[in-house]
Image: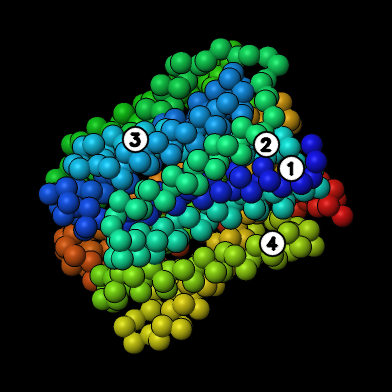
């Protein structure tokens, strides 16, 4: 395959990633308007975000098997078709239930696009170009959740919330055509049977635990239901691990955990991604509810994170090649913690330029850590196991994104209870305490990172040099 064609595939996959991650947060600033049209409370429309993320978490594990069984081009194209069609349905929704069902369907398309797209890119990328390729397809995943609130706020203010979903249609149509033309058919030589039990156990465990965290925001009203889903998730998780270790053809290949770089970055990534995914959720709320800033202006301020992501992209590969993965990830991990703590000092008197600078720095550190983790995770994975590894890392990525929103909301609720005695409308001090508490997650990631070998990822660096 020519390098030009490989680049086109890379850009195509990156664009679909952007669509998928954008739709995880784009409705955040449109909730009041949507609630008004649906005739429900704004908080009730949040089920649209939850339904989307739960579907992603439940279905991503099966993506690798589907790609091997029916071909990467077929599944990737089908995923874009489902995602685009469901976007139309979301935009045409006239009540909450139809909207929620449409979001579930959209989540089904998104669950296939991300991991299968990663498989396609990695199979068509030379070793010396992997850092660049992973950096490029990681970048849309970084900016999607960040620019989502701004795009949603703009379209809601100057058009209608329906266009939040209709903008996916032209992109999706172009993506369907290009994926069929550019991507070569590929099926695994050995067809494995579907691990039905593994799929049921894993899907139940992931969706139950994420939903339990979502319910914990209203713990005073949902105690019994929350405990039930926690127990269900833990039980399904134990059964899942037990089954995957014994199954002849497991849906998720746990032998991948014997690869040190894969195992360590999986845990490091889970902690740090959860924390970094909570920030695009907490910051817009803090600017609007805590500081009383207009939703659209708040969205524009959050774009500073996107600018930081964009600028860091040019420096990531040279830095990793020169200094190595462990050194960069460790130093940057401390900078991530510092950027969280600085957010706690933003007040109503803080100039907009300084707010933008703080968020810009957060974007720099966020981008560097995400790209480093995503690249190193697959550095030592053999080609035959790439489908399973991609499915597992994509599952972990989506879990951490879903957990980020849920944990961010939970921490804000806990901060309100600590400061006010109950979960009322959060005040400035509640948001400040939340930014401090959220630093516990990157601290845990640094604890896991110390186990990483100093020469981890050197094969990628040597191939480039």
- Relative depth, front residue between 80 and 198: 80
Spatial CA distance of label 1 from label 3 is 33 Å
* Mark 2 residue element: helix
Q: Determine crowd level at label 2: few under 14, some 14-19, many 20+ residues with C-alpha closer than 10 A.
A: some
Mark closest to the chain's N terminus, 4 or 2: 2
Residue located beneath label 2 in the image: 182
**CA distance separating discs 4 and 2:** 28 Å
Q: Earlier in the sequence, mark 2 or mark 1?
A: 1
Foreground: disc 1 or disc 3 = 1
Write down the residue under mark 1: 5
In the image, taking residue 446 as reference, residue 219 lies left or right, namely left
Of the 4 image quadrants, the one containing the N terminus is top right
- Labelled pair 2, 1 in contact (Cβ < 8 Å): yes
Q: Toward the viewer: 317 or 334?
A: 317
The secondary structure type at the circle numbered 1 is helix
Which circle marks residue 104 in the picture?
A: 3
State the residue at coordinates (55%, 23%): 66
Q: Earlier in the sequence, mark 3 or mark 4?
A: 3
Identify the residue at image location x=31%, y=42%. 90
Task: Tell me how far mark 2 sits from mark 1, CA to CA.
Answer: 7 Å
Q: Earlier in the sequence, mark 4 or mark 1?
A: 1
How many C-alpha atoms fall within 10 Å of the one at disc 3: few (<14), some, or many (≥20)? many
Front-most of 222 and 242? 222
């Amino acid at each position: 395959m020519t390098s030009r064609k490989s680049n086109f595939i890379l850009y195509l996959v990156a664009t679909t990633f952007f669509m998928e991650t954008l739709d995880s947060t784009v409705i955040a600033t449109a909730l009041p308007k949507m609630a008004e049209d649906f005739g429900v409370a704004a908080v009730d429309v949040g089920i649209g975000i939850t339904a989307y993320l739960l579907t992603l978490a439940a279905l991503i594990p099966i993506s690798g098997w589907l790609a091997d069984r029916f071909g990467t081009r077929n599944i990737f194209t089908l995923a874009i078709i489902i995602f685009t069609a469901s976007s139309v349905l979301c935009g045409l929704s006239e009540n909450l239930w139809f909207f929620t069902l449409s979001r579930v369907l959209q989540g089904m398309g998104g669950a296939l696009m991300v991991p299968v797209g990663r498989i396609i890119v990695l199979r068509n990328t030379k070793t010396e170009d992997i850092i660049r390729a992973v950096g490029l397809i990681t970048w849309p995943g970084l900016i999607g959740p960040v620019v989502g609130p701004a795009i949603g706020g703009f379209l809601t203010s100057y058009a209608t919330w329906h266009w939040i979903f209709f903008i996916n249609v032209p992109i999706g149509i172009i993506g369907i055509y290009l994926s069929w033309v550019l991507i070569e058919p590929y099926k695994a030589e050995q067809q494995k049977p579907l691990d039905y039990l593994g799929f049921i156990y894993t899907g139940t465990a992931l969706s139950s635990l994420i939903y339990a965290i979502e319910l914990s925001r209203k713990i005073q009203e949902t105690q019994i239901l929350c405990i039930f889903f926690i127990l269900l998730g833990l039980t399904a998780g134990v059964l899942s691990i037990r089954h995957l270790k014994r199954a002849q053809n497991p849906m998720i290949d746990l032998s991948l955990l014997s690869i040190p770089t894969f195992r360590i970055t999986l845990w490091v990534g889970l902690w740090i991604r959860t924390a970094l995914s909570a920030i695009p959720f907490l910051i817009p709320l803090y600017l609007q509810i805590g500081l009383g800033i207009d939703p659209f202006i708040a969205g524009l301020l959050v774009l500073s994170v996107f600018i930081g992501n964009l600028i860091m992209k040019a420096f990531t590969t040279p830095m990793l090649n020169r200094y190595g993965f462990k050194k960069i990830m460790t130093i940057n991990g401390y900078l991530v913690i510092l950027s969280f703590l600085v957010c706690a000092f933003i007040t109503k008197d803080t100039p907009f330029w300084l707010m933008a600078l703080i968020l810009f720095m957060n974007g720099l550190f966020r981008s560097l850590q995400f790209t480093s983790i995503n690249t190193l995770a697959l550095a030592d994975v053999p080609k035959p196991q790439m489908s399973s590894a991609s499915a597992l890392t994509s599952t972990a990525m989506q879990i951490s994104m879903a957990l980020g929103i849920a944990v961010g909301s939970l921490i804000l609720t806990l901060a309100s209870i600590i400061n006010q005695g109950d979960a009322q409308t959060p005040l400035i001090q509640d948001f400040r305490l939340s930014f401090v508490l959220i630093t516990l997650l990157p601290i845990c990631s640094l604890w896991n990172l110390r186990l990483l070998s100093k020469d981890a990822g050197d094969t990628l660096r040597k191939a480039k040099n």
